[in-house]
Image (cartoon, rainbow, N blue to C red):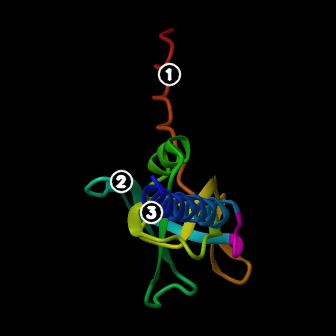
Amino acid sequence: MKSLKFVLLPLIVLAVLAAGWIWAALSWSYSEGERAGWVQKLSKKGWLCKTWEGELSLVSLPGSTAEKFFFTVHDEAVAADITRHIGKRVALHYEEKVGLPSSCFGETRHFITKVTLTEDIPLAPGISLPNPPSAVPAAPAPAASR
């Protein structure tokens, strides 16, 4: 009975400490901010733990090489919102989580919490191109006969 107590008690303490570490890492954000660009890819990945993984193409100047911002999404509603805006310029609000023990929580440290469609695409100072509308415009009404 005593030997079981000396084996079981440290295992329980380790499990509680590990759960506390994971809870703290998920609750606390190292940094947060926004990145704007075009969502190129969003897919649900993983063998056991499925997470939404995506990439955002960031272009600072027209004609320059695009930088990619890799991100993870846990919320299904946010993933659906991002899917609706693929191919359009968006701003993604993220929280950076540090210290998560495995890739089961996501492949990146950047967790998206909100997506906002941006209205203008800046091409140069003072020149902007409107973002394409999300809905297809209605067909024109037929002309009335006289």
Q: Earlier in the sequence, mark 2 or mark 1?
A: 2
For the residues labelled 2 and 1, the Cα–Cα distance comes to: 51 Å
Q: Which residue is mark 3?
A: 7
Q: Name the residue rendered at 67%, 69% in the picture.
A: 34
Question: In the displayed image of the protein, which residue is found farthest to the front?
Answer: 1
Q: Where is residue 86 shown, x and y percent of the image?
A: 44, 55
Q: Earlier in the sequence, mark 2 or mark 3?
A: 3
Say the numbered circle drawn on residue 92. Answer: none
Q: Which residues are magenta?
A: 28-33
Question: In the displayed image of the protein, which residue is found farthest to the bottom?
Answer: 64
Q: Which residue is mark 2?
A: 49
Q: Is residue 46 magenta?
A: no
User: Mark 3, residues whose alpha carbon is within 10 Å: few (<14), some, or many (≥20)?
Assistant: few
Q: In the image, what residue type sits under mark 1? A: Ala
User: Mark 2, residues whose alpha carbon is within 10 Å: few (<14), some, or many (≥20)?
Assistant: few
Q: Which residue is mark 1?
A: 141
